[in-house]
């Protein structure tokens, strides 16, 4: 009996430690089955064909080692007054039985080499909201066309974008302009996250509208990067 109790105590994880069980991926879509069978060997084949990715495991399989960044979309009262931005937005709905809270998270994923995606997740738990946002960001991944479109540079390396592009979401309008090598990312801290994960090192960013709404700001930049392929259609 003592040995059994010792085994039970050993299996209990420490407080604050999250134990994730690694499960084998079982594809649920035909696209996932083709990827697992080796018929599709590159993410470019999926993006060029226009097929919709419905399983985030497909991106994990074809693009391992993706990095992620949480966008600061929430706010709370800071020390000494004012507002402090936090990555989780908390909203409340008043019912007869009391308040019902919901958590929202917004994530950007990318490999810093031409692939980036965004996603939003909502849940009653912060961890579940982050996990939902991560899965949706992987399913919304796109390829970014990089180049050297600045007349001041002309080096030919993919450190910037090939030409000026524009994106819009809500009241926010974003214009991305190619910059010469060495300028860096001329943008705010939240915009730098998606540009850095997309593999862009030098770019000028011009914004209009209510840019304090970070979800609209990042979505507008995402659409601007997506519009780089508008002349190839």
Image (cartoon, rainbow, N blue to C red):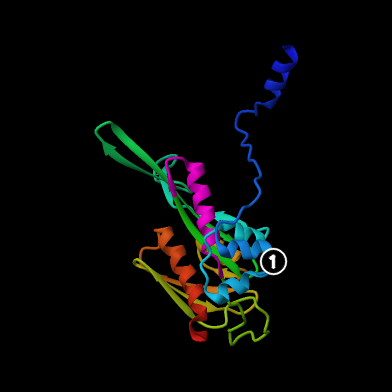
- Report x, y in % for residue 85: 45, 49
* In the image, residue 135 above or below residue 3: below
- Decide which of 155, 127 is in the foreground and name it: 127
- Report x, y in % for residue 215: 43, 59
- Is 14 on the left or on the right of 216, as rendered? right
Q: Is residue 63 visible?
A: no
- Is 57 on the left or on the right of 2, as rendered? left
Our reading of the magenta stretch's main secondary structure is helix
> Which residue corresponds to the image point at 40% horizontal and 71% vertical from the top-left?
168
Magenta-tinted stretch = 122-142
* In the image, residue 232 above or below residue 86: below
Residue picked out by circle 1: 38
> Which residue corresponds to the image point at 47% horizontal and 63% vertical from the top-left?
218
> Which residue corresponds to the image point at 64% horizontal and 41% vertical from the top-left?
21
- Report x, y in % for residue 89: 42, 47
Farthest right residue?
3
Number of numbered discs = 1
Q: Is residue 27 visible?
A: yes
- Is 20 on the left or on the right of 192, as rendered? right
Farthest left residue?
96
- Report x, y in % for residue 159: 64, 75
Question: Is the N terminus in the top left, top right, bottom left or bottom right quadrant?
Answer: top right
Q: Secondary structure at mark 1?
A: loop
Q: Is residue 140 a member of the stretch shown in magenta? A: yes
- Is 5 on the left or on the right of 179, as rendered? right
* In the image, residue 125 above or below residue 179: above
Q: Residues within 10 Å of mark 1 (few under 14, many from 20)?
A: few
Q: Is residue 153 a member of the stretch shown in magenta? A: no
């Amino acid at each position: 009996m003592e040995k059994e109790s010792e085994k039970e105590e050993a299996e209990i994880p420490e407080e604050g430690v999250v134990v994730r069980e690694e499960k084998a991926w079982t594809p649920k879509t035909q696209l996932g089955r083709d990827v697992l069978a080796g018929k599709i060997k590159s993410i470019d084949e999926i993006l060029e064909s226009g097929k919709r990715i419905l399983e985030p495991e497909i991106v994990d399989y074809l693009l391992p080692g993706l990095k992620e960044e949480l966008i600061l979309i929430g706010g709370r009262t800071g020390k000494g007054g004012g507002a402090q931005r936090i990555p989780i937005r908390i909203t409340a709905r008043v019912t007869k039985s009391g308040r019902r809270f919901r958590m929202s998270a917004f994530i950007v994923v990318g490999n810093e080499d031409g692939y980036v995606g965004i996603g939003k997740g909502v849940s009653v738990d912060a961890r579940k909201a982050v996990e939902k946002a991560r899965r949706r960001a992987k399913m919304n991944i796109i390829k970014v066309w990089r180049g050297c479109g600045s007349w001041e540079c002309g080096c030919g390396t993919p450190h910037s974008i090939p030409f000026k592009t524009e994106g819009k979401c809500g009241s926010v309008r974003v214009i991305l302009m190619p910059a010469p090598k060495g300028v860096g990312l001329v943008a705010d801290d939240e915009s730098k996250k998606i540009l850095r994960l997309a593999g862009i090192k030098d770019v000028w960013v011009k914004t209009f509208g209510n840019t304090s709404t970070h979800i609209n700001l990042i979505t507008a930049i995402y659409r601007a990067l997506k519009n780089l392929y508008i002349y190839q259609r």
